[in-house]
Image (cartoon, rainbow, N blue to C red):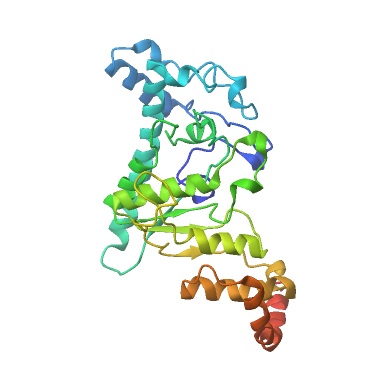
Amino acid sequence: MGPAGELRYPSYPESEGKWRFPGIGEFQCYDKYMMASLRASAHSQGKPHWGFGGPHDAGNYNQMPEETGFFQRDGSWQSEYGQFFLEWYSQMLIAHGEGVLAAAAGIFCGTGVTISGKVAGIHWHYGTRSHAAELTAGYYNTRSRDGYLPIAQMFAKHSVTLNFTCIEMRDVEQPAQALCSPEHLVRQVALASRKAGVRMAGENALPRFDEGAHHQIVQKSRLQMSEKGDNTATHEELEPLSAFTFLRMGESLFRSENWSLFVPFVRHMEEGRTFHPWEEEARTVEIRVHATRPLVQEAASLMYH
């Protein structure tokens, strides 16, 4: 679908050293195929001068929204040109996703296989009006526009599960200057999935083994909210996640202090319990941890060979 298997543009290439958190990233629209599409779209709108490239004032990979003319609070992302460009840019991504999912659905049709596609949890700058990091990645999601509903509808069209990340993150854990809100982002995507009638799966963005992350995953796998997004209301309950991928199996998972927390976490996910005291659960599972230690040690040793 895209970088790291996710439906997005490579707007924040961390591995190449170009980008570092919480930079806004850059638009990816400058190869000859994207430029040809942009020119054609601009001509169809009767604005051929809009087809020569992306926004000139969108900054670079590591800038903050308010340092740019395009993404700042009252920036040109709200202008007629800005709306045209963002609509085109996001639709190109959705069209790519549709092509991939249609091919996959055709290949696996009738086999009983469940197909899922990944959507990135770009939670930094979610607290701003423009949601700059989401925009450069291809998600036309702003404070006044839901960019995830069209994506969820595309997934639903092909009966593909929408797999979303950052389920383990809490808002209070994020750096204040980045205006992150992973919890509100997860809630928005869950509601979009519900409206579109598509199943939602999840995974954690970072390899964490602490009970705080485990507890957050259990809670967010069964969100409750009203249609207005008020999670204090309980009269409307979203479907629980259809699946969860835990990242990841490695040496750290098999350390006794982490394994003793991982076992009750898995049981909580399986049984659907959300508010059981973690300390009690950890104590009751201690005997089981000792019993499984030989298997854990064997599994850990095999990872080195």
**57 up-or-down from 262: above or below:** above
Decide if residue 102 is in sight here: no
Residue 5 x %, y %: 49, 50
Question: Viewer-proximal residue, 248 or 16?
Answer: 248
Residue for point 41% across, 63% down: 240
Residue 286 x %, y %: 69, 83
**151 up-or-down from 194: above or below:** above
**299 up-or-down from 79: above or below:** below
Q: Is residue 91 left or right of residue 176?
A: left
**190 up-or-down from 60: above or below:** below
Residue for point 63% across, 67% down: 249
Residue for point 40% across, 45% down: 229
> Where on the picture, by quarter, is residue 16?
top right
Question: Viewer-proximal residue, 55 or 267?
Answer: 267
Image quarter of the C terminus: bottom right
Decide if residue 203 is in sight here: yes
Question: Viewer-proximal residue, 174 or 197?
Answer: 174
Residue 122 x %, y %: 53, 42
Q: Is residue 249 left or right of residue 223?
A: right
> Where on the picture, by quarter, is residue 89?
top left
Residue 15 x %, y %: 65, 43
> Where on the picture, by quarter, is residue 198?
bottom left
**Numbered disc total:** 0
